Amino acid sequence: MAHRARPLLAAALLAAALTGCGTATSTAPAPGTAAPGAAASSAPPSISPTTAPAAPVAAAPLPASKPVRVRIPAAGVDASPLLGLGLAADGSVEVPSVADGDKIGWYTKGVTPGETGPAVLIGHFDTARGPAVLKDVARVRAGEEITVSRADGSTAVFRVRELEQVDKKAFPTAKVYGDTARPELRVITCGGEITDGHRPDNIILYADLVG
């Protein structure tokens, strides 16, 4: 993942593939679980996988600076502050807790958004408490922008290049976390019809730095 944290990349690659919002890191019900008295969103989040041409000239990489705000206009997302996510005790990537369903998390073992490499953001589509921060992810289309404000006052603007929906059992770990030659961004959430109390898919947005 991050060029400065290759052992952690190896850990992520060897661990269970990221399930996005498939498991909570708190004792609250897992996202998408229909807990008594708390109905999760019944709409099955799904997308039509699409790909847009990559930007002909990638924007210059930015120095490291923590993300503090994420805006995805097409999905109605304007989230701040961001949560810091690391690795859980079992070696899998953490996800926001159910209580933080309205927040976006940044995987701190990777690069910051704008640096060379794949920066990773994670948020819930819904939880047992209802719709969450990425409830409208299906509205995002290739070619649209994601803006990340950073602690140093700079802004990283990304353009969505690809949208992918995959079964969590076939999560493309290397594609999401593997090194890249330019600054890229991934936004991950859940998808699919609730099955046995959980959503079986991940929705992944891949975006390139353009400004």
Image: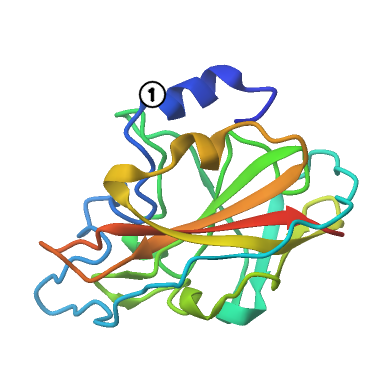
Q: Secondary structure at mark 1?
A: helix
Residue 176 sits above or below residue 21 on the image: above
Residue 73 picture quarter: bottom right
Q: Position of residue 179 (x, y in %)?
A: 64, 31
At 69% from the left and 73% from the top, the residue drawn is: 144
Q: In terms of depth relative to the viewer, which is nearer, 53 or 18?
A: 53
At 36% from the left and 38% from the top, the residue drawn is: 17
Relative to 209, 197 lies left or right: left
Q: Position of residue 177 (x, y in %)?
A: 54, 37
Relative to 60, 18 lies left or right: left
At 70% from the left and 48% from the top, the residue drawn is: 184
**Crowd tier of the residue under label 1, counting other residues whose Cα lies within 10 Å: few below 14, some 14–19, many 20 or above:** few
Total of numbered circles in the picture?
1
Residue 150 picture quarter: bottom right
Q: Amino acid at mark 1?
A: Leu
Q: Position of residue 207 (x, y in %)?
A: 67, 57
Residue 91 sits above or below residue 61 on the image: above
At 59% from the left and 20% from the top, the residue drawn is: 6
Q: Position of residue 149 (x, y in %)?
A: 76, 61
Residue 136 sits above or below residue 94 on the image: below
The quarter in which the C terminus is drawn is: bottom right
The quarter in which the N terminus is drawn is: top right
**Residue at mark 1:** 14
Relative to 172, 185 lies left or right: right
Q: In terms of depth relative to the viewer, which is nearer, 12 or 140?
A: 140
